[in-house]
Image (tube, rainbow, N blue to C red):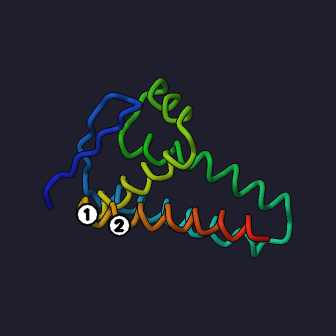
Amino acid sequence: MERAKLHIDELNKTFKISHTNKNMRKSYQFQLTMAKLGQLNDVDDVNEQMKQVAEYSDVLIDFPADVLNLTDKQKEALDEMEQDKLQELDVTLALKIQGMSNTQIADVIDSMRDSEHGDADSKSEK
């Protein structure tokens, strides 16, 4: 598998993505965490909901920091990003690790954006 690259504007740096088993496992774990967050409405306990959201916010930084071997300063730069943009970065990274093409990744990101707008539209209709 050809080594993919990922440019992060906020860090002004391009990273080579390794398709190692270790990184694959981390990408699957990240996606599992995202899926659990998607089921948050099924959790009745508000404290548990907030705990899961807080943990997810940490994962958004920890996943790319671990895979890309980021410095503390680079992690801080990611922490200053808008959450939606950081989530897109993480999804892109996970899918690049898994060998998806840029076109496939763009389709996934577009679908995420459409889903978010759909959720906002349905909430505004209430």
**Disc 1: which residue:** 103
Quadrant showing the C terminus? bottom right
Q: Is residue 6 left or right of residue 88?
A: left
Q: Residues within 10 Å of mark 2 (few under 14, many from 20)?
A: few
Q: Name which residue lies at 52% across and 42% down.
A: 61
Q: Name which residue lies at 30% across and 64% down.
A: 98
Which of these two is toward me, 102 or 126? 126
Q: Name which residue lies at 66% across and 51% down.
A: 55
SS state under label 2: helix
Q: Is residue 36 left or right of residue 68?
A: right
Instruction: Check the image and name the residue furthest to the left.
Output: 2
Quadrant showing the N terminus? bottom left
* Residue 103 sits in quarter: bottom left
Q: Is residue 36 left or right of residue 65?
A: right
Which of these two is toward me, 40 or 1? 40
Q: Residues within 10 Å of mark 1 (few under 14, many from 20)?
A: few
Residues tagged 2 and 1 counted as in contact (Cβ below 8 A): yes
| Coordinates of residue 49 in the picture (x, y in percent) | 77, 61
- Does 27 sit above or below residue 122? above
- Kind of residue at badge 2: Asp
| Coordinates of residue 125 in the picture (x, y in percent) | 74, 70
- Does 26 sit above or below residue 72? below
Instruction: Check the image and name the residue furthest to the bottom.
Output: 42
**Disc 2: which residue:** 107
- Kind of residue at badge 1: Thr
Q: Name which residue lies at 30% across and 31% down.
A: 13
| Coordinates of residue 12 in the picture (x, y in percent) | 33, 28
SS state under label 1: helix
